[in-house]
């Protein structure tokens, strides 16, 4: 299965849920300050565990930053 994550093509051996992808990227669901978009649509945190990734999907992980 091929998925583009933050502009980089990645290949995974199995179909997975969004939470599994975040775990592989060492991002905890409990971590604050980031959002996830799947195919240019924001996925609410409450749906991460049930959102299944498909071949060809594009995932963007956006982290909030503070500036001065």
Image (cartoon, rainbow, N blue to C red):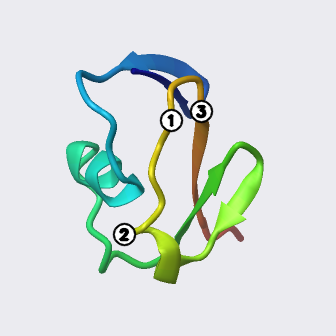
Q: Disc 1 vs disc 3: Cβ atoms closer than 8 Å?
A: yes
**Residue 66 place in picture, x, y as percent:** 62, 71
Circles 2, 1 touching at the beta carbon (< 8 Å): no
Give x and y (percent) for residue 39. Answer: 71, 43
Q: Position of residue 56 (x, y in %)?
A: 58, 23
Residue sitting at 28 percent across and 44 percent down?
25
Which mark lies nearer to you, 1 or 3? Answer: 1
Picture disc at residue 54? 1
Q: Which numbered marker is on residue 49?
A: 2
Helix, strand or loop for disc 2: loop
N-term mark: 2 or 3: 2
- Mark number, residue 19: none
The answer to which quarter of the image holds residue 6 is top right
From the viewer's side, name the closer residue of 8 and 14. 14
Task: Give whichever of discs 2 and 1 has the lower sequence position.
Answer: 2
Residue 26, placed above or below residue 51? above
Residue positioned 32% across, 44% down in the render: 16
Left or right of 10, for residue 68:
right
Residue linked to disc 3:
57
Residue at 77% x, 47% y is: 40
- Determine which quarter of the picture holds residue 49: bottom left
């Amino acid at each position: 299965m091929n998925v583009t994550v933050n502009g980089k093509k990645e290949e995974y051996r199995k179909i997975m849920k969004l939470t599994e992808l975040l775990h592989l990227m060492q991002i905890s669901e409990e971590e604050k300050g980031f959002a996830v978009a799947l195919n240019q649509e924001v996925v609410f945190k409450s749906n991460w565990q049930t959102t299944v990734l498909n071949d060809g999907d594009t995932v963007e992980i956006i982290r909030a930053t503070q500036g001065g």
